[in-house]
Amino acid sequence: MALTNFGTLSAGQLTAWSRDFWQVARNLSFVNQFAGSGQNAMIQRITELTKNEKGTKAIITLLADMTGDGVTGDNTLEGNEEALRAYDLTIELDQLRFANRIAGRLTDQKTVVNFREQSRDALAYAMADRMDQLAFLTLSGIAYTHKTNGGLRTTSGTTGLELVDLEFASDVSAPTTNRHLRVDVAGGTSTLAAGDTTAVTADDKIAYRDIVNLKAFAKDSFIRGLRGAGNDEVFHMFVTPQQMADLKLDSDFLANVRNAGVRGPANGLFAGTSSLMVDGVMIREFRHVFDTSGATTGNSGNAGAAGYKWGANANVVGARALFCGAQALAMADIGNPEVVEDTFDYSNQAGISIGKIFGLRKPKYNSDYNGGVEDFGVICLDTAQ
């Protein structure tokens, strides 16, 4: 195969190739299917920058419900207006880049792989996968020093080579008090308790009743769902593959899905689908939902420490399911990615790089329900798996 000729792409072709790359990356990204520009999206995408006194920023606005009861009859309304309470949240921006580089002209001649096309697919998958990981770590309140399997990421010692170096990494925050729950089966019946990773036991596996109770808790806590057909509220719940397996082995969950679904091979249980609708909650299985399968097994002295399993003795494989309503996550998605093609070593080596400017943040607001600052649209549910 002839050496890829990087000089044949015009500026217009490079722009088109950049858009093509981003389309591939978006199609590969799991979280992208839940992103939208309006307030009825689980992930609100901000595509324009807003100018304020501190410069140009990516800002998401959360609007609190009105608390007044209005003015009755012919009583004077003027002077009794209620001010709208808007909470502006700034999303820090940073750039994430990936690059491929071939060994040289001879290597390229020996292969039948089209370097540009193969590189596009590889770079698109890498970008989509890291954005998925970052989104789920942000929603879970887990620092970017962790992998989504609970293990700690390898540190390089060089600034800029780790996800924790991203500008918005410092905005990752643990679940707020009333948005952090766990499954507790200590009494023989599964109930919801206050979140505490050191209190999780191997028996605390997710069940159908937990989904029902969690939805009721979310509505009582004024977490707004996504408006669907018939103006009904729908929530999304993300679980690990093992949590989904635990649900499918729960008799109540199994009966609910089996009786509500269509008969025959098209039934979700027979089809092996990774998403099932239960009680107005779409249960979705995804590999990057946080768990501790890759974390270190410790002892009581390691309970609650970063990089260790859960439980009083740091030996329980746990998982953090995410129950999400509207505006659970804010994502700044600024412009198309930048594609740069270059040559090195007297044009003997060719390389392609992709850079994307974006940012992520979990919105918080001052809750009228409990008077404190709470995560706006997500509840974390810790279980064993």
Image (cartoon, rainbow, N blue to C red):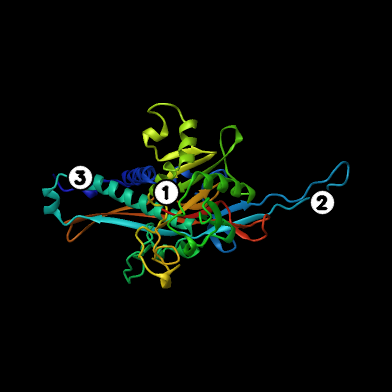
Q: Secondary structure at mark 3?
A: loop
| Structural crowding at the residue carrying mark 2, measured as other residues with C-alpha within 10 Å and reported as few (<14), some (14–19) or many (≥20) | few
Q: Give 204 or 38, whichever is nearer the viewer.
A: 204
Pointers 2 and 1 in contact (CB under 8 A)? no
What's the residue type where badge 3 is placed? Asn
Where does the image place residue 75, in percent across and percent down from the top left? 88, 45
Q: Nearer the viewer, mark 2 or mark 3?
A: 2
What's the residue type where badge 2 is placed? Asn
Q: Nearer the viewer, mark 1 or mark 3?
A: 1
Q: Give 250 or 143, whichever is nearer the viewer.
A: 250
Where residue 140 is drawn, which disc sits there?
none
Of the two numbered discs 1 and 3 on the same chain, state the one appearing first in sequence. 3
| Structural crowding at the residue carrying mark 3, measured as other residues with C-alpha within 10 Å and reported as few (<14), some (14–19) or many (≥20) | few
Of the two numbered discs 2 and 1 on the same chain, state the one appearing first in sequence. 2
Q: Secondary structure at mark 2?
A: loop
Pointers 2 and 3 in contact (CB under 8 A)? no
Where residue 243 is drawn, which disc sits there?
1
Q: Which residue is mark 3?
A: 114
CA gap between label 2 and label 1 equals 51 Å
| Structural crowding at the residue carrying mark 1, measured as other residues with C-alpha within 10 Å and reported as few (<14), some (14–19) or many (≥20) | many
Q: Which residue is mark 2?
A: 80
Which quarter of the figure has residue 314?
A: bottom left
